[in-house]
Amino acid sequence: MFAWLVGSDSRPPVFLKFRSSTTFIILTVATAVFTDIFVYGIIVPVLPFALTERSNIKPDSIQTWISIFLAVYGAALLVASPFCGWLADQSSSRRAPLLIGLLALGACTVMLCIGNSIAVLAVGRVLQGFSAAVVWVVGLALMVDTVGPEGIGQVMGYIGLSMSLAILLAPLLGGVVFAAAGYYAVFAMAFGLIVLDIILRLFMIEKKVAVRWLPDQVVHVPNAGIKREDQVDPEDGRISTADLEMRAMSPAQDAEKTGQDDIKQSDSEVATTPRLRGKWTSRLPAVVTLLASRRLLSALWACLMQASLLTAFDAILPLFVRDTFGWNSTGAGLVFLPLVLASFFGPIVGWASDKIGPRWLATTGFVLSCPFLILLRLVEKDTLQQKVLLCALLALVGVGLTLVLIPMMAEITYAVDAKAQRHPPGFFGRNGAYAQAYSLFNMAWAGGCMVGPLLAGLVNQKAGWGPTTLILGVVSIVTAIPVSVWTGGSIWKKRRRDREDVNLGTSE
């Protein structure tokens, strides 16, 4: 009945080339990210109403319950991320987990829409956290499957762009629609977007599935069919991506080629490859093996710090502009616009990361953010010049943080591939360990979103605006140190090898 849609042995699905194209898959994942954040964001303006009018919560307890719901969402995201990563890497298809996440998103939206008790709203937030974990973990892994490491930076830029659009539009539209048309109209927007998301996720066909009907389809196979003489040092720089993408082959062909490559290795080549781990390491979860990579840990730390710096303003900026400039909630919301404007250049930053590597882009981002974070302390008076200064400094901080996030998201892919080179082909399984790596990214990001506002709010309450921005600047410059050392592999090993190459060339 649905053979025209899903295909059969004798008949490919309708519009197969378009549905399995890189453009359509990127569009689908970007829409999934946009939908997830948009549904989260449009609820923010109506949540106080839902608590007071529908759940009979006293007005003086609203702030407490909003904080609790934020914590519940963050906890669900943290707990669900590693599970989603493991499930996605074990699954034969990335689309199936994405559809499960969509069901969770639909269920949470229904519960938040009709819920009239704290318990129902809390369960809705838990499901929302689970849905976010699926979208980010599986969606980013699907991006790597689709484009391979050589183009992942620019693709992550598009994902960052969709995220920024949702962050900007969701609270704005949620507040406007709620004021103009009421409570249920806000959720009508959410359900309409979810329907669009359903259509895209159902119509999307992964490249590794499309190869069944399109034998010439190029598929990225994690850690398979790579000649060892073409590899670079696993702890130094990006891997030669020309060797990381190969045409799809049958399991028999894959096994035959792998065997031939192993036989062709000379003794000298074997001697230069890292010593294989014991059998017990192959039984460890991929997450444990990945966490042994200082390169990946550095990337995760950078993501955690970037999220902390960005979300710290959620706790301190609205209060600052209210007390200093007397701005209302509209002004407090619009002041975030300069901070996120730079993220619209995410695809360009990602393209640059693909060309020159993520190390110096991310390092520059943290170094650049430092002085502008500290200079925010100069904003003290309610004058036009001070308001312009605040917006300009926030825009420059946004540029720095954008230079960090997109390259670091790509660096996670590079780090996973580098780690895979130190093990036999297939060590991380058929699908590699991309989903589990991005589950760690999700946890780092969620941790930063929890730590940043909490610590910034506490420091601001005790010491004020100036000391808070000073601490944020110090955190930024300190984080630049491990990023410059470990991003792209150990910089010390790279310099040592460069010296050895120079000496070898001189002797010849």
Image (spheres, rainbow, N blue to C red):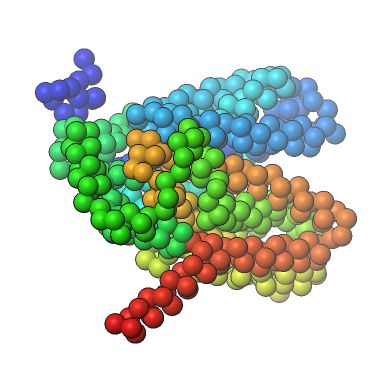
Q: Position of residue 243 (x, y in %)?
A: 27, 55
* Furthest-bottom residue in this view: 506
Q: Position of residue 319 (x, y in %)?
A: 78, 53
Whether residue 336 sits left or right of residue 457 in the image: it is left
* Furthest-left residue in this view: 10
- Quarter of the image with the C terminus is bottom left
Please tell me whether residue 206 is drawn above or below residue 339 in the rendered image.
above
Q: Position of residue 289 (x, y in %)?
A: 51, 42
Residue drawn where x is 72% and y is 70% of the image: 374
> Residue 98 versus residue 487: which sits nearer the camera?
487
Residue drawn where x is 38% and y is 35% of the image: 429
- Quarter of the image with the N terminus is top left
Whether residue 247 sits left or right of residue 104 in the image: it is left
Q: Position of residue 327 (x, y in %)?
A: 74, 56
Please tell me whether residue 236 is drawn above or below residue 139 in the rendered image.
below
Residue drawn where x is 23% and y is 25% of the image: 5
> Residue 454 versus residue 173: which sits nearer the camera?
454
Q: Is residue 175 visible?
A: yes
* Furthest-top residue in this view: 1
Q: Is residue 46 visible?
A: no
